[in-house]
Amino acid sequence: MAPRTSSWPVWSNISSTDNNIKSADDWIEAHRMEDGAETLWRVHDELYDLEPWIKKHPGGPQWLEITKGTDITELFVTYHLNTKMVTDVIRKFYVRQAVTPRKSPFTFKPDGFYNVLKSRAAKQLSLVKPDNYTIKSMLVVDTYILVTLALCIGVSLTQNILHTLILAVLTGAVLGLGTVASHNFTHLKDNWRMYYVQLSMISVREWRISHVFSHHIFTNTVQDLEMTLLYPFIHWFPTDDKPFTVRLFPFLTPVIYPFIIPGQLAIRTFKGKNDIADLLIFVIPALLMLFGQLTVISALIAWLFIVMTSSFMFTFVGFSAPHHFPDNFHDGDNVNGEHMDWGLHQTYTSVERNEPIDNIFLTMATFGDHTLHHLFPALDHSLIPLLQDTFEDTCKEFGLDLTQKSAVTIARGQFKQLVRLTPNDPKRIP
């Protein structure tokens, strides 16, 4: 199929935007063919052989293993606050200059919004001890997952089928919120808590491609897999090729939410891309069968209710996060020029949400403080609030709008975006 039409000319004729990209592995393989990294790692216009560094990488080997053969410029810049230190390290692995221009519209000019904000954030965070804060996020996700496992045992002990199913739905809801909170740890260096998301059938490896490499870097564009994988059931772009079901019945799109995460498991199983971590999906059915009196069939039915409820909750929270408000940039909207500061792009694709309750249990389970999380994805979520004043001051300096919207307004906005056909005018570029 032909590539999707993009606001950015650089993506007008490349296969990584084709409609037949249906999995994270399809997407990363397309980038290996298109990024001009030549089986190496590309940062800006330079190629590096990081093979000797994979096992020494402080963030863990998986990051480099997955990205071999691709352009990692945005990941390199945004995942390392101390740019000078990591630049000194990576120079040891320099091979040669790339022979093709970068296929990305995003820039990181020294005096641009992102690098100015990043330098200020690094200075701010140098004054604190991160470990004093990260224990909070650990407590949050451990609590959600432990409550989920306890509820699983409760499901297995119920004798009434109706009570079993009601408790299974409750278990799935808590698991969904716990999965949202646990996603924090998939952004950090390799750690055992990142595997909590596997309980809801999400693959850490696949998630890092589709969410970290794709969504976080190319937010709301044709390169964002969270925008494209569900086509034609969900169509976020302001283009006139929306299926009539989306145009006429946008409020019915949540019908597919329970099937999204199990569907991704089916796709990677069919394509033979499962790994050993996928065995963790059987923890919940094992609890259902080992700690109670449920038959195998009853346990499987309860498990089905848990995972489908979890998928619904996780997807609803994700789509109700600040990205799909109709005033945000979505690919297909008009832009000024062929390039944009990456940090500006992140602010244009995320509306600020008014948090009625300042509680880390709530913010982590609902993708709170979302714009700052996108700007500094490698930071543990417990550190994000420390940058709020710095962020607001820098945005004011660059003339950026931080008007907050309520969670309800943003949630309703996603359905308005689903039916929006008219491109927005360009955002003001300082």
Image (tube, grey):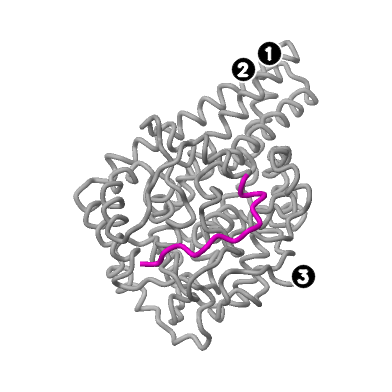
Question: Going from the N terminus, do you reach mark 2 or mark 3 first?
Answer: 3
Where residue 179 appears, as percent x and y from the top left, is 54, 38
In the picture provided, is 19 more to the left or to the right than 47?
right
Write the residue at 39% across / 38% down. 137
Residue 389 relative to residue 228: left or right? left
User: What's the residue type where badge 2 is placed?
Assistant: Gly
In the displayed structure, does residue 128 sit left or right of residue 79?
left
Circles 1 and 2, Cβ within 8 Å, touching? The answer is yes
- Magenta residues (range): 416-430
Secondary structure of the residue carrying tag 2 is helix
| Amino acid at dot 1 | Thr
Asked if the stretch drawn in magenta spans residue 408, the answer is: no
Label placed on residue 1: 3
User: Which residue is nearer to you in this view: 93 or 38?
Assistant: 38
Which mark is in front, 3 or 1? 3
Residue 430, image quadrant: bottom left
Q: Marks 3 and 1, how far apart in space?
A: 51 Å
Task: Write down the residue under mark 1.
Answer: 158
> Is residue 29 depicted above or below 145 in this figure?
below
Element type where label 3 sits in the image: loop
Q: How many marks?
A: 3
User: Looking at the image, which residue is at 31% across and 67% down?
Assistant: 83
Residue picked out by circle 2: 154
In contact (CB < 8 Å): disc 3 and disc 1? no
Q: Earlier in the sequence, mark 3 or mark 1?
A: 3
> Where is residue 290 shown, x and y percent of the image?
67, 23
Question: In the image, is 22 to the left or to the right of 89?
Answer: right
Residue 14 percent location from the top left of the image: 65, 75
